[in-house]
Amino acid sequence: MHDALTGLLARRPVAERETWRSLWDRLGDGSLDKEQAVALLASLTTRLPGPETLHALRESLLERRPAVPAGHWHGTVNVVGTGGGPATFNISTASAFVAAAMGVRVVKSGSRAYTSGLGSVDLLERLGVRPTASYEQTERALERYGIAFTGPFVYPVELARLARTIAPTGMKPFGRFLNALGPFLADLPTSAQVTGVSHTMPHAALRALADRVTDRRIWLTTNPEGADELLPFTDNTIHTNDPADREILLKYGQLIAPDGSFDELRPVDPAAAAGHFLDVLGGDTTATVTRTLCLNAAALAMASGHSTGWRPALAAAERAVAGGAARELAERMRARTTLAGAGAGAGAGAGAGAGIGAGTGARRG
């Protein structure tokens, strides 16, 4: 049994990066068998390890990635959450469209659902919006639309190798671990990252992990309702990795009307999800839905540095919804994908579908 697995099962810290390097080497050459791979994922899921182990695990994966393109996507924010909270429609995906319609450069990383019925990739597929397959495609999407939805290329290949090793067992039973660490594994040269943390996740361990990230601003959002999104009908706390401003408290009723409930944010039938999503972007639902959307879009504007005040950011988000800019952006991306798909032929369409299905990230919304 590998030393990393032995330490995890004994509930000891596995904080030596070399131990994790050895594990990934064995996974790569095929000498880590299915039994050990399942035991590894089960151990990480049953009891998420402490910050020292998580940091060593994360760094050992990121150092194996091919180099990202030279340069930095200044002013760009990645929105990716942990999932696992109360079931809602895809709030973070919708807020990404609203923020982009405000002029914020947004990247949304995600996957098919692990802990809910419809992940961000599932929704995008229904909308007809394809995730990008490379950094170059992501940059082109950012230039054209101000928003990009990334495919599985941003995640370490070791996750896909684990999935193949444990087949036919799926990865879904291990969603808690993948959802917790996934937001810290997407390798993107953004200036900021906003990650909602649900009540099912170990807040202290994830805050400690975020504090070790030095290449971008990290915002971890939480609230007493246990959701991994900002909510207008409760207090919200944002933990940051900025030593000068560790916490931002958004008090109930401080910025927007303090009414509404989860009943208005529940997911709809997957067959109706695309139409409902477009209605949300156009403000054709309830006031609570629109307020929730705008609050989360304002957070993306603030974290990215696009806005310097919450009230102006909220006002800009409200205009993007009420004026139709957010829905128009989504419709434009759908039309572009449809035209590209029609011109590419059946072979290209099959390849894109395979890429979507291979996602190993960690996001519900």
Image: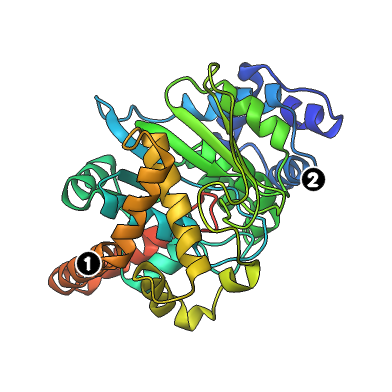
Where residue 139 sits in the image (x, y, percent)? 22, 42
Count of labels shown? Answer: 2
Sequence-earlier tag: 1 or 2: 2
Who's the residue at 21% across and 72% down the image?
A: 338
Residue located beneath label 1 in the image = 337
Q: Is residue 176 above or below residue 273?
A: above
| Residue 239 picture quarter | top right
Q: Quadrant of residue 207?
A: top right
Q: Label 2 amino acid?
A: Thr
Image x and y of residue 182, in percent: 55, 42
Q: Secondary structure at mark 1?
A: helix
Circle 1: residue type:
Thr
Task: Identify the residue at image location x=60%, y=63%.
Answer: 259
The residue at the point 41 percent across, 61 percent down is 94
Q: Which mark is residue 46?
A: 2
Residues marked 1 and 2 touching at CB (< 8 Å): no
Residue 252, position as x, y percentages in the image: 62, 49
**Residue 10 visible in this rendered orientation of the protein:** yes
